[in-house]
Amino acid sequence: MNQVCAEAQSTEAAENQLLPAALSALYADHSRAIYYLALRFLGDPQKAEDATHDVFLKALRHLDQFRGEASARTWLYRIAINHCKNVRAAWHDRHVLPSSDNEFLERLPGGESPLRILETKELGDRIQKALAGLPAEYRLLLLLVSDQELSYEEAGALTGQTADAVRGKLHRARKAFAALFVKTE
């Protein structure tokens, strides 16, 4: 009996040592993608960084709820999408203007010409304005499929839709984005 208890404790200790390594690998594999998803969703690098950390903390807290029916990537994206929606719905975000883009200009490599920097910033502003003008569902589908390169099936699993519904809505989202992007000139 003591031997069985000792083996069970040994197995549990080994699993507890593997947990931080597995979480570290999960973070290393997916943190960049989660950050870029949050950045596109929230439009602010600092908020995106905070959201990325929050997503992995939530994943750690709810690791026991991961059923393995979807990939870890899809599970993390679902957490990130829900978290970013909650952040955007917060009172503070609805009533405070975002910070300026000066941080973006300071982070660019030193060898670029000021004209190129300005063109890049203006293009980014136009893209953000066009994305902001889209309905939330279209924006989300564009981010998941075009930006994060998820398949229609994966995007459908995250949004609770069929792959065919995602395909159709994505077609309409791209057309709407193109129309809004032209208007930003």
Image (cartoon, rainbow, N blue to C red):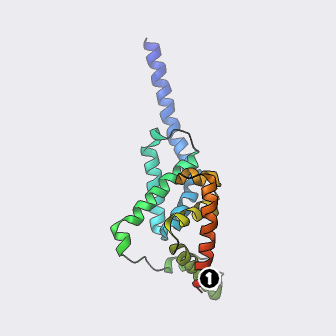
Residue at 50% in and 81% down? 102
Residue at 49% in and 66% down? 136
Seen from the viewer's position, the closer of residues 46 and 135 is: 135
In the picture, measured across the screen, residue 4 lies left or right of residue 124, that is left
- Occupied quadrant, residue 114: bottom right
Picture layout, residue 47 above or below residue 30 = below
- Occupied quadrant, residue 6: top left
Picture layout, residue 81 above or below residue 14 = below
Picture layout, residue 163 above or below residue 40 = above
Residue 19 placement (x, y as % from top left):
50, 39
Picture layout, residue 73 above or below residue 17 = below
In the picture, measured across the screen, residue 56 lies left or right of residue 70, that is left
Please indicate, yes or no, whether residue 147 appears anywhere in the rendered image.
Answer: no
For numbered disc 1, what is the local secondary structure? helix
In the picture, measured across the screen, residue 172 lies left or right of residue 137, that is right
Seen from the viewer's position, the closer of residues 10 and 48 is: 48
Residue 98 placement (x, y as % from top left):
43, 76
Residue that carries the numbered disc 1 in the rendered image: 182
Seen from the viewer's position, the closer of residues 99 and 159 is: 159
Residue type at tag 1: Val
Q: Residues within 10 Å of mark 1 (few under 14, many from 20)?
A: few
Please indicate, yes or no, whether residue 166 appears anywhere in the rendered image.
Answer: yes
Residue at 66% in and 81% down? 111
Residue 69 placement (x, y as % from top left):
56, 40
- Labels in figure, total: 1
Residue 165 placement (x, y as % from top left):
60, 56
Quadrant (top left, top right, bottom left, bottom right) of the N terminus: top left
**Extreme-top residue of the structure:** 1
Residue at 40% in and 63% down? 87
